[in-house]
Image: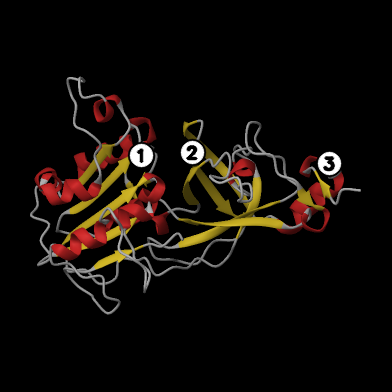
Amino acid sequence: MSDTIEPAQLDAEEAESLRKTHYNATVIERIDVHDDLARFRIRPDEPTVPFDPGQYVAIGMGNWEPRLPGTQTEMVPENKLRKLGRRAYSISCPLLDSAGVIAPVNSIDYLEFYVTLVRRADDEHKKPPVLTPRLFMLDAGGRLELQRKITGHYVLGEIDPGDTVLMLGTGTGEAPHNAMSAHLLANGHQGKVINATSVRQRRDLGYAKEHALLMSQYANYRYLSFTTRDPENLDPSHPGYVGKQYLQSLFTSGRLAELAEDPLSPANTHVFLCGNPSMIGYVPPGADPPATPGMLQVLGDAGFSDEHDSIGAGSIRFEKYW
């Protein structure tokens, strides 16, 4: 006899009892960018303690909850059916409130998350994705668990008022940079604040309108977006052909500095990296360097440092998701 059971087979009364026991937060708004990408605004039942932009927190949902149709089937063992599956997410930011006024993370009573739906594992030997196929079943009013501890070392730290802040992200790695950008601008940072992101297609730019409005309000803010899989990236016959726009090549070519209207010099620039490990280029101790240099290698060649005790201009901070 099988020891697995489909999540949907837990009876409704017990499922509701488990939700009341474990869940402590409500989705108050869901903003769909497209079918596989959304912004979730989640309000905890109890206010969160103040936290630093760039930090993260875990979201949880019960293994008994239904999964979005079209996602990978998951068979949950009976002894795990009543437990929660969790995943940590960097906290994003709405950037602007409903009146168009800048809204840093500690000015609002909810947490915003920028989430990609993972429909199936990228390897047949890996377990099916636990959280997002369930999270994407929720609309406004949906309940879930939001862990109380907000943590993480990927934070701004000490930055002189006139320094340049360069944030480089891929995909939803933009999330903590949105929180950092809003914080810097709301607190009167005078230097350039450059939030650059590379995504597969323009449709993956979930905050494009907010960034445009923010740039119209703050002369020192730049949001730079690049793509790698739109027609102009792939088709040499396209009239606007630019090739695949990777942050590493944009930096080394000088194009990033040109668009930022800033030399991006280690003499006055702090760099933050979040997203695809290939973009970041972190090399664990004893491992071989990547065949294609990541930003850590590119920035190192330009005079920046990612040493743990490196602070101030010329330093690199990066978020690890692996």
Q: Is residue 218 visible?
A: no
Q: Give whichever of 278, 15 is nearer the camera.
A: 278
Rendered residue at 45%/55% (across/down): 91
Determine the secondary structure under disc 3: helix
Q: Give whichever of 232, 151 is nearer the camera.
A: 232
The location of residue 231, given as percent across then percent down, is 29, 24
Callout in the foreground (2, 3)? 3
Spatial CA distance of label 1 from label 3 is: 38 Å
Determine which residue is flagged by label 1.
207
Q: Amino acid at mark 3?
A: Gln
Determine which residue is flagged by label 3.
9
Q: Amino acid at mark 1?
A: Tyr
Q: Give whichever of 234, 172 is nearer the camera.
A: 234
Q: Which mark is residue 38?
A: 2
Spatial CA distance of label 2 from label 1 is: 10 Å
Asked whether the beta carbons under mark 2 and mark 1 sit within 8 Å of each other, the answer is no
Determine the secondary structure under disc 2: strand
Q: Which mark is residue 42?
A: none
Quick one: label 1, few (<14), some, or many (20+) residues within 10 Å?
A: some
The location of residue 250, given as percent across then percent down, is 18, 46
Determine the secondary structure under disc 1: loop
Quick one: label 3, few (<14), some, or many (20+) residues within 10 Å?
A: few
The location of residue 87, given as percent across then percent down, is 57, 56
